[in-house]
Image (cartoon, rainbow, N blue to C red):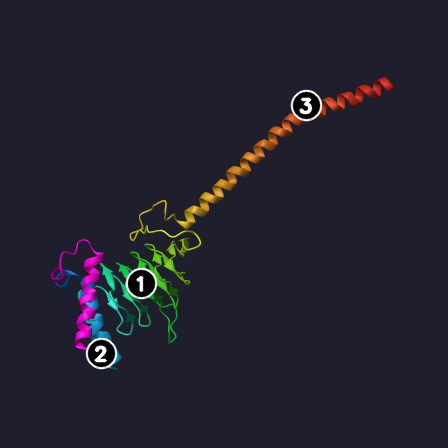
Amino acid sequence: MTLGIFTRLTEDIDSFITRDPAARSRVEVLLCYPGYHSVLFYRLANALWRRRLKLLGRFISNIGKILTGIEIHPGATIGRRFFIDHGNGIVIGETSEIADDVTLYQGVTLGGTSLEKGKRHPTLKNDVIVGAGAQVLGPIIVGDGARIGANAVVLKDVPKGATMVGIPAKMVMGRDKGLTEEFTAYGTPTEDLPDPILRSFESLRAQLNVLAKRVKDLEVELEEAKPMAGSDVANDKGLSSSGG
């Protein structure tokens, strides 16, 4: 069992080295990374929580929050190779479930939308990345490999491989729209990840331009039709006079 815990903690260190180019060594991660420290506090607090030492687990968890600025409830379920980048301001609720190889950036909230007991926090599947400041709320499921853009507010299930941005979050990339390797964890705009609200305005503007052009064309056609209509009336009058 001790070997298993040591292996798990070593994996966590390696995940920081793999996913953070600023990490130079395991010793640096161990001594200088509050994200890793928060994972250490969580592993200990969770072990106590599962052994029904819940008050002690909460106490250890609270110490971790004070020292790291990252709040992880000891009742949460977190898988292997969990990576927290920067991390300050992260909140992970009691019934949150996080699978393997998940990445969270600073300011992320995995929160609940109900005061009832039971499952009320999100489930993040394997390889999910949640950008800075994003809010994932309620007992929803974020599918394997999904990406949550910075500052997005996610209130519904996210399909596997989708990229979600905006408030409320909408899918801008997915299996039905083409997968992408591009992901902006800090919300910098790119052509690959358009803001869905901005895109809606652009669509409306394009439609208005089309309608305006059509109205202008109809006005021109109407102006051209007036002389012809006047000529036909004059001809009708001439024929009537000659007939009389």
Q: Earlier in the sequence, mark 3 or mark 1?
A: 1
Foreground pick, 227 / 2 = 2
Q: What is the residue that sits farthest to the top in this orientation? A: 242
| Residue at position x 22%, y 71% in the image | 42
Alpha carbon of mark 2 to alpha carbon of mark 1: how far? 24 Å
Q: What is the residue that sits farthest to the right in this orientation? A: 244
Q: Position of residue 113 (x, y in %)?
A: 38, 68
Task: Write the start and end of the magenta stretch as one range.
Answer: 1-28
Q: Position of residue 27 (x, y in %)?
A: 11, 62
SS under mark 3:
helix
* Residue 99 occupies quadrant: bottom left
Alpha carbon of mark 3 to alpha carbon of mark 1: how far? 69 Å
Q: Amino acid at mark 2?
A: Leu
Question: Considering the image in quadrants, where does the N terminus appear?
Answer: bottom left
Q: Amino acid at mark 1?
A: Thr
| Residue at position x 77%, y 21% in the image | 235
SS under mark 2:
helix
| Residue at position x 37%, y 64% in the image | 137
Q: Which mark is residue 153?
A: none
Q: Which mark is residue 109?
A: 1
Q: How many labels, in total?
A: 3
Q: Which mark is residue 227?
A: 3
Query: Horizontal placement of 59 versus 183: left or right?
Result: left
Q: Position of residue 212 (x, y in %)?
A: 54, 36
Q: Are marks 3 and 1 in contact (CB under 8 Å)?
A: no
Q: What is the residue that sits farthest to the bottom in this orientation? A: 52
Q: Give yes or no for residue 26 being in the magenta stretch.
A: yes
Q: Earlier in the sequence, mark 3 or mark 2?
A: 2
Q: Nearer the viewer, mark 3 or mark 2?
A: 2
SS under mark 1:
strand
Alpha carbon of mark 3 to alpha carbon of mark 2: how far? 92 Å
Residue matched to label 2: 48
